[in-house]
Amino acid sequence: MSMPALAHPHPRAHVDSARLGRLAIASLHAELACAPKPGLVTPFDSGSHADMDAGTFLRSLFALRHYFRDAARAGASAAPFAQLRRHGIAAEAAMLRATGGINTHRGAIFSLGLLVAAAAALRRDTGRTPAAEQVCLAVQRWAPAVASAPLDANSPGQRMRAAHGIAGVREQAIAGYPILRELGVPTLRHALAAGLPREAALCHTLMRLVAHVDDLNLLHRGGAAGLAWARLQARDFIAAGGAFAPQWRVHLAAIGDDFVARRLSPGGSADLLACSWFLLQQEAA
C-alpha cells in the first residue's frame, strides 16, 4: 500500500523577520539621507532642529535595530497588539537613551512597527509577498486594541490632536493607513516608474504628503497658521512640477530656508515617507 504524500509547507511560509527589520531600518535611513527636505534633518544640516543632527538619528537607528525584527516576529506569530505595544515602549526607551532624551523616531516606532508586523503576518498567513496596500489594510487586525490603548496626553502630538480636533496616526492605523494607500505609496511608485532617481522620488513624495497631511509636528511648531503656510508651499512646489522640474533642488532648498526661518518641521510627513518606502521595498523582499 502506498503511503500518502507528505504535505509540504509553502516555500514562502517561513517569514524572514530579520530581513523585514533591516528593510525598516534602511527605510528610515533613506528618509534621513535624502535632501533637500524643508525643516528636516539631513546629512548636511539640522533643518529647524537645534537639538539634533544626522548623528542623533544614526544613534537612534542603531538603538532600534532589533525592534523592527521583533515586531516582524510578533506579527508572524499572530501576537496581540499588547505584545507589539510592549516592544514599542521598550524601543522608545532605547531611542531616548541613545539620543539623550531627544525624540527622533517616536512616530516611526508606532507606524512602521505596525506595518512591519502586518507585512510579516500576511507572509505567514498567505505564503506570499503582499502588495503595499494589503499591508496597510492588514494593520486593521489590531484596530480594536489600537483604539483602546492608552495615550500619552502630555506628548506634543497628542496635545495638538486634542486642541485642533484632527486625526492622528492612531486613526490612520485604525483605518488601514489610507494616507499611505491613496497618496504616499502611489506617488512614490509613480515617481520611480517615471524614472526619477530615488532621492528625487522621495523628496517629491514628501512634499505631496506635506501638502495633504494634518502634520502634528507642523501644528506643534507653527499652529494652524504654520500648518496652512507649509501646506501651501508644498502645493506650490508640486504645481511647479515638483521633483520633475529641472531646477527642483533650488526651489526646494529655498522653501527649506523659509521653513527654517519659521522653525517648522514636517516630522509626521517624514515618518509617512519612510513608511511608504518600506512598503514598496518589502514588495521585492
Image (cartoon, helix red, strand yellow):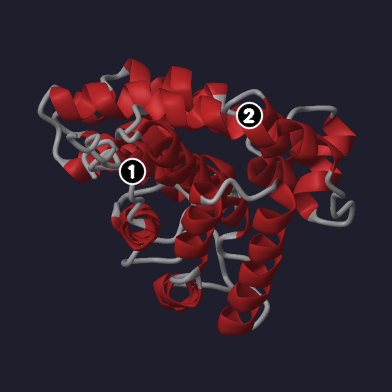
Q: What residue is rendered at 50% in x and 30% in y? A: 136
Q: Which of 1 and 104 is in front in this view?
A: 1
Disc on the earlier residue, 2 or 1: 1
Tags 2 and 1 touching, CB below 8 Å: no
Q: Is residue 15 left or right of residue 86?
A: left
The amino acid on which the numbered mark 1 sits, given as a three-letter code, is Ala
Asked if residue 268 lies left or right of residue 144, the reply is left
Q: Residue at x 84, y 31 (%)?
A: 164
Q: Residues within 10 Å of mark 1 (few under 14, many from 20)?
A: some
Question: Which numbered tag is attached to residue 13?
Answer: 1
Q: Is residue 214 left or right of residue 17?
A: right
Secondary structure state at the residue bearing disc 2: helix
The quarter of the rendered structure image containing the C terminus is top left
Q: Which of marks 2 and 1 is in front?
A: 1
Return the residue at label 2. 140
Q: How crowded is mark 2: few (under 14 residues within 10 Å), some or many (20 or more)?
A: some
Residue 258 in view in this figure: no
Q: Pick out the residue farthest to the left.
A: 195
As measured in the structure, the alpha-carbon distance from the residue carrying label 2 to the one carrying label 1 is: 21 Å
Percent across and percent down for residue 14 are 33, 50
Camera-nearest residue between 39 and 183: 183
Q: Is residue 23 above or below residue 248?
A: below
Q: Which residue lies furthest to the front in this view?
A: 1
Residue 126 figure quarter: top left
